[in-house]
Amino acid sequence: VVSCKFGHLESYGYLDTNKHVLYCITPRFEHPSSQTLFLKLDPAKDWIDTRFDFHFYEPIRVESVAPVIITHGDHLVRVKGEGFSKSMRLMCYFGDACEAAIVEAIVSSNTTTECRFPWESITEFGPEIPLSLAYNGVDFAASNSPLTFTNQGNIITLR
């Protein structure tokens, strides 16, 4: 039996002997924080300090993005939602999570962030580009609708 402790909260752990991997079930924290991970591999022994900090984040939610149509030019995509933090490194994923172009978000507030559109990777995308945000590269908050890329020119003047 393996025990895990995140800060002062104990949780269940188990060892997969086939893969030589130790798993810990994370407890729920009400506020974003960093907690040191401790392990107990034998109930009769003391806790082992792993010196590894585990970061708990407030859940992210994406409500809207603008613009939803991207043309050539320098675009910042504005994302409205919840759970954005200036103290944590929030990343924007353009494309499918496994093959996404990743850029660091520019967090303005806990409800607004911006992502610079990754033009250098545009050839890898189709016309519809999913946008997701994540702190850890695992727990994603996705936009309800993809961005649309058009290769057509910008209208400068209409007469």
Image (spheres, helix red, strand yellow):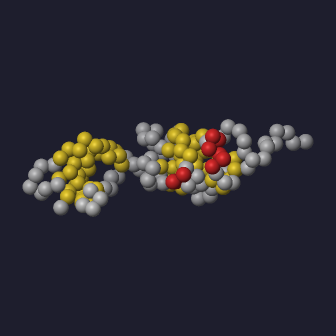
Q: Where is residue 34 in the image (x, y as percent from the top left)?
A: 32, 44
- Residue 108 falls left or right of residue 89: right
> Please, which residue is most extreme toward the right here?
159
Q: Assign the N terminus to one quadrant of the image.
A: bottom left
Relative image position of residue 68 (x, y in whole percent) = 67, 51
Residue nearest the viewer, comparing 111 with 122 = 122
Up/down of 62 relative to 114, above or below? below
Residue at x 35%, y 46% (from the top left corner): 55
Corner quadrant of residue 49: top left
- Name which quarter of the figure residue 121 lies in: top right
- Residue at the (71%, 39%) spot, across then down: 73
Residue at the image point whose x is 63% and y is 49% from the top: 124
- 116 vs 137, left or right, is right
Q: Front-most of 65 and 149? A: 149
Residue nearest the observer in this picture, 114 or 50: 50
Q: Residue furthest left?
A: 44
Counting from the top left corner in percent of width and height, residue 28 is at 32, 56
Whether residue 76 sits left or right of residue 3 in the image: it is right
User: Residue 135, can we see it?
Assistant: yes
Give the x, y percent position of residue 45. Answer: 10, 52
Q: What residue appears at the point 23 percent right and 44 percent down from the top-left corner?
A: 50
Task: Answer yes or no: is residue 80 visible.
Answer: no
Against 17, is 67 above or below?
A: above
